[in-house]
Image (tube, rainbow, N blue to C red):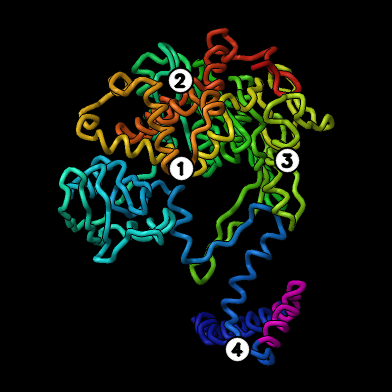
Amino acid sequence: MQKFKRIKYWAPLICALMFAAGMWLGVFLTSQKKPLPGVEKLNELLTLIQEHYVDEVDLDSLIEKSLPGILGNLDPHSAYIPAKDLEEANQTLRGSFGGIGVRYQMYRDTINIVEIIVGGPSEKAGLHAGDRIIAVDGRNVTGKDMTVDSVPTLLKGPENSKVELTVVRPSAPGKTFKYNITRGNIPVSSVDAYFMADKNTGYVRVSSFGQNTYREFMNAMLNLVTNGAESVVLDLRGNTGGYMESAVLMANEFLPRNKTIVSTRGRNAQEEIIRSDGTGAFTDMPLTILVDEMTASAAEIVSGAIQDHDRGLVIGRRTFGKGLVQKPIQLSDGSEVRLTVQRYYTPSGRSIQKQYKPGHNDDYELEVFERYRNGEFTNADSIKINEDLLFSTENGRPVYGGGGILPDVFVPEDTTGVTRYYMDVVNKGLLMDYAYEFTDQNRRVLSQVKDLDRLMRILPPDAELLNMAVYYAATHGVPARWYYINQSSLLIVRQVKALIARNVLGLPFYYQVLEQDDPNVKRALREIRSGNAHAPISVGQSKGGGKP
């Protein structure tokens, strides 16, 4: 009992001594820790500016402007995102945003509604495709000062917030209509289109890898399989990447169990290897993947995994070459740093990342243009490869590291019909404007059309459509030059038809019209029919292989 009392008596004193020792140790360790190199100098500089600079300076603003420069001297993909821009920067990847649920284009200095998203706030409120928005919350939004870039700030907003739109409707001349709309959660689809490319082959176009991409992709694939698809063309051209997790899930659907999909390595982290789990629904389906110079990051993970395991054919042109992994880190003021912390490697061990020089980001961005100047877009022999970075696929085919994924089958850029006249009318947006005007003038008839075949049948003959487009361009500043027009006629008519299909039926039908004459899609279908798209053994060659 006395022993227990002695312990009870000394316990508070022991605790106090331990607490004091802990505080002393913390102070000691803190005093021994050296500041990061340059931090003291930076603090000195900011203090000098604050105390002695000739004019008063907002140091917060100065630091805000300096952060992108600091990160830009690390690599081309580390980035700083101010708090005010973070919401918009995350919208595409998150898969939704707060808005009214329309697709629009600027036409004659006015916001013209091209499409009403089914089930969205605008459909519920009663807006129609073809309506012109002339005021938002009582403020005039027409005129030459309005640009397509300024529209999102007017129409987007937090979910459940309200906005008043004033519109005019071509079918009711002289009248205006006011709609009070409660903004909703509008989905951003990353699967732009899917359809049957032929009797047995499905086509899926994926524009990015966001939170909902895998779910959208599976819905598309299941729909295609239900409609008879036994093989698939996966179009990743122009796909700039996004979430690695979505890319891994997609690749997993095509690979048998225990196949490496991607590995990551960093300075302060152990190598992480991600493998397929054997639950893929399409492991036996013939597969081709379309890529180009803007296919990047997560899209390169899918392409590299399929190629390295000889699971399908990669077709097109060399991909961008972004193999750096960014970790989003939120700062105390709500802004975010996306810091490069690892590199991606394909199953064969290739680094996806192309070379870069820290602080020379302009050169890095212009590298794709240099490929074009060097003839890489039109000739496989112009592709520069590093013979020292030779790797092998599962079946022993040669593949190369050093930046991007080289295709198994090279298809040159299609420049058929691209003339100076065609570039003039495209760059001025005249084909898009003409397609919208044609749709608008014939909206009563076209609104009854529900499928692409019917739409193509009721459009004017190609020669008439061409003449009308040329006349429209001539009245809007591009004179008719028939020598060039005849060379570009097929391209002009196809583009106009695709744009009309978008206006009448929606974005997926735009791609469906264009892909009917796409050389990459045609080559993919040929390879599938030839039996080369399931387990390639001899198709791949050192510089992209094959001939278009």
141 horizontally vs 251: left or right: left
Q: Which element type, helix, strand or loop, lies under badge 3?
A: helix
Instruction: Estimate the spatial distance between the alpha carbons at disc 2 and disc 4, rounded to whole Å.
Output: 62 Å
Question: Which amino acid, mark 3?
Answer: Glu
Verify whether residue 38 appears in magenta.
yes
**Which residue bears the numbered disc 4?**
56
Instruction: Estimate the spatial distance between the alpha carbons at disc 1 and disc 3, rounded to whole Å.
Output: 26 Å
| Residue at figure coordinates x 42%, y 56% from the top left | 147
| Residue at figure coordinates x 75%, y 30% from the top left | 383
Q: Which residues are magenta?
A: 30-49
Q: For residue 183, say whether it is visible.
A: yes
Of the image marks 1 and 2, the number of the one nearer the N terminus: 1
> Looking at the rendered structure, which numbered label has been put on residue 233?
none
Of the image marks 4 and 3, the number of the one nearer the N terminus: 4
Q: Nearer the viewer, mark 2 or mark 4?
A: 2
Of the pair 490 and 148, the residue shown nearer to us: 490
**Which residue bears the numbered disc 3?**
370
> Looking at the rendered structure, which numbered label has been put on residue 429?
1
Q: Nearer the viewer, mark 1 or mark 2?
A: 1
**Which residue bears the numbered disc 2?**
516
Q: Which element type, helix, strand or loop, lies under badge 2?
A: helix
Tell me whether circle 3 and circle 2 mark residues in contact (CB < 8 Å).
no
Relative vertical location of residue 33 with respect to residue 430 in this rendering, above or below: below
Q: For residue 256, say whether it is visible.
A: no
Of the image marks 1 and 4, the number of the one nearer the N terminus: 4
Of the image marks 1 and 3, the number of the one nearer the N terminus: 3
308 horizontally vs 157: left or right: right
Relative vertical location of residue 383 with respect to residue 47 in this rendering, above or below: above
Q: Which element type, helix, strand or loop, lies under badge 1?
A: loop
